[in-house]
Amino acid sequence: MQPTRAAFAVLALGLGWLLVACASQEDLRNTSRDLLSRHEELRTELKEARQRNAELETSIREFKGQDLSQILGRLETQRRDIDALLSGLDDQKAQVYSLEKKLQDRLDTQDQRLGGYEKRAEATDKNIDQVNEKVREVGTKLSAQMDQHAAVLARLEEAIKQVDIQTGPLSAEVKR
């Protein structure tokens, strides 16, 4: 979080000097307000994305005792939520990029830092894909284990029937 604050501080300082040099006081206030507003919007979106990421991690830890279909449903819902957040982040980045074009000399380094958000979003998508694959693997393993257990139960039932058949005449003789 500190590098982001520092980046926006440098952005604000550079913007301030540039505007003092070539803009009126009112333009300076408007641009400063716009940048602060964009900064707060990006910060809010980032906090929401981090919160959803933490919720996703908590959900992943709890999934062992839950029904597989319920887990898949929750993962799909969370994936849609993350996609919506990423879409919001993309919109915010587009607004920031338009401001950067106006102040290109001072803001080129900030553009590189904002590119990191996209990499994080891609990493999150990859992590979600890995989680989905892991859930599929667990489902396959559970299905195979259930089939094995069913076969063992069928053999046990057959063995019990055989024992009952064999002990039937013996118990009749014992009663005599």
Image (tube, grey):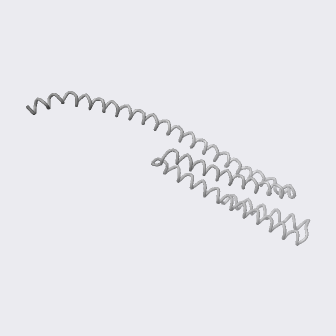
Q: Residue at x 69, y 47 (%)?
A: 119
What residue is drawn where x is 39% and y is 34%? 150
Q: Quadrant of residue 34?
A: bottom right
- Residue 78 versus residue 38 in the image, above or below: above
x, y (%) of residue 106?
A: 83, 57
83 relative position to 103: left or right: left
- Which of 73/167 is in front? 167
Tell which residue pokes out farthest to the bottom in this image.
25
Seen from the viewer's position, the closer of residues 101 and 154 is 154
Position of the N terminus, as image quadrant, is bottom right
Q: Where's the C terminus, which quadrant? A: top left
Quarter of the rendering containing residue 12: bottom right
Q: How many marks?
A: 0
Where does residue 146 sit, x and y in percent of width and height? 42, 36
Q: Nearer the viewer, residue 148 or 128?
A: 148
x then y, percent, for residue 113: 74, 52
Q: Give above or below for 110 relative to 162.
A: below
**Is residue 40 rendered to the left or right of residue 53?**
right
Q: Viewed as shown, does residue 120 lie left or right of 27?
A: left
> In this orientation, which residue lies closer to the viewer: 144 or 138?
144
Residue drawn 10% across the image and 33% down it: 175
Residue 121 horizontal/vertical position (percent): 67, 49
Residue at the image point whose x is 84% and y is 71% from the top: 29
